[in-house]
Image (cartoon, rainbow, N blue to C red):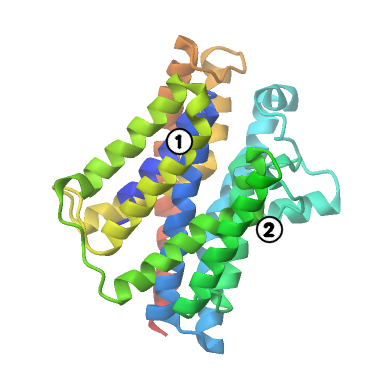
Amino acid sequence: MFGLLRTILALLVMVGHLLNIWQIGTYAVFGFYMISGYLMTHIMHQTYGFNVRGRWSFACNRFLRLYPLYWCSAFITVLLIGFVGKEYVTSYNSSIFLPQSLTDFLANITMVYPLLFANEYKPILVPTTWAITVELFFYAAICLGLSRTRFRVQLWLAVSVIYVAYCLYHGLGWRYRYFPIMAGSLPFAMGAYIYFLKKEGWALIDDWFFQPQYLLLGVLINMVAVIVYDYYFEMGFYVNAFFCVLLCYQIANGALWPRLSAQFDKVIGEYSYPIYLLQWQAGIFTSYMLLGQPIHNSSIHGIAILLLALLIVLVVSFILIRLIDQPVQTLRTTLKKR
C-alpha cells in the first residue's frame, strides 16, 4: 500500500521544483529513500533471496523497473531541446543540455553521475535522476547483503547517525547531509530497520493520530511550516524524517488508506516514477507554450504553469505506463516467479 504515498511524494517534488520551493522536494526525496530501504530489504528477504540466482533476478528486476522509462524520458528531453531550443531549456534549468563527451553520455545513460554532489553534474537530461545515483548504490549494497541481518542493519544505522553527527560537529553545510551517497544512508537504513521490526512482530499502532492519512497531514503541515518560516528548515527536515518513518512503519504493518483498495493503490503508484522523471520537461514545454518565458516560481504565472504541466505529465505518464511499463512489468513478474 505504498503506491499512493510514492505518487504524492513525486507530486510534492514536482511542486517544489516548478514553484521553486525547493525545501518541499528535499523532504519528499528522503521519504522516497525510506520507502526504498524498506521495500528493497523486504523483497530481497521474501522474494529473491541472497543466493546468486536471487541476486541476479533482483538486479534484472531493478534494471527493468528503472531504465526503460528513464530512457524514454531522456529521449523526450532531447526532442524538447530540438523543439524549443537549447537556450530556452538551459535558461529554465541550466543542467539540461545535450551530452558532449563520452563520460557525459555514459553518465546520462546509466544515471550514475560521478560527483560527490551528483545534483551538480552537467549535463543531466533528467535532473531529478541525481537521486537515482544514490538509490542505485543502496540497491546494490542491499542486494550484496547489507540488510541481510538485523545486526548488519543496526550497524549500518549507527554508522549513518555517526556520519550525520560528524557533519554537524564539523559545521559542514546541510547539503552534505542531503546530496552525497552517505547522506542517503540514514533514511535507507531506517527503512531497512522497519523490515526487521515488522519481522519480529512489532504491532501496528492503532491510535487515530498514527493512521496514514493523519501522518501524511503532519508531513504536509511540516512542509507548509518551512515555507512560512525559513529558519525552521533544518529542524523541519528531521521532523519530516520522523513522520516518514512512522508512515513507512504503519503501512508496512498493514495500515490502510481510507476507502482505497490495494489494487487502486497499486495503479496510483504506477504514476510515481514517470511523474518524478518528466516534471522538468513538462514545466519547460508548458512555460514555452503558455507564456514563451522560462518561468518556474510561485507567482500566478508559475502556478498556472504548474497546473497545466501536471495535466501534461499525467497524460504522458499514462501513455508511457501503457506502452512501456506494463509490458515490462509482465517480464518482471516472470522473473519474480522464477
In the foreground, 239 or 299: 239
Mark 1, secondary structure of its residue: helix
The part of the image, by quadrant, that contains residue 77 is top right
Is residue 70 shown to the viewer in this render? yes
Where residue 7 sits in the image (x, y, percent)? 38, 45
- Split into 4 quadrants, where in the image is the N terminus? bottom left
Looking at the rendered structure, which numbered label has been put on residue 2? Answer: none
Q: Earlier in the sequence, mark 1 or mark 2?
A: 2
The part of the image, by quadrant, that contains residue 223 is top left
Relative horizontal placement of residue 210, taking residue 88 as reference (left or right): left
- Distance Cα–Cα, label 1 vs label 2: 33 Å
Please tell me which residue is depicted at 61% across the width and 46% down the height of the picture: 177
The part of the image, by quadrant, that contains residue 199 is bottom left
Please tell me which residue is depicted at 41% across the width and 79% down the height of the picture: 45
As drawn, 157 above or below 243: below
As drawn, 93 above or below 314: above
Mark 2, secondary structure of its residue: helix
Is residue 319 shown to the viewer in this render? no
Label 1 packing within 10 angstroms: few (<14), some (14-19), many (20+)? many
Where residue 42 sits in the image (x, y, percent)? 40, 72
In the foreground, 99 or 177: 177
In the foreground, 41 or 273: 41
As drawn, 221 above or below 252: above
Give, as a three-letter code, the residue at label 1: Gly
Where residue 289 sits in the image (x, y, percent)? 54, 18
Please tell me which residue is depicted at 22% across the width and 58% down the height of the picture: 262
In the picture of the structure, the residue carrying the numbered disc 1 is 236
Where residue 229 sits in the image (x, y, percent)? 46, 21
Looking at the rendered structure, which numbered label has been put on residue 110? Answer: 2
Q: Between label 1 and label 2, give the one nearer the viewer.
A: 1
Label 2 packing within 10 angstroms: few (<14), some (14-19), many (20+)? some
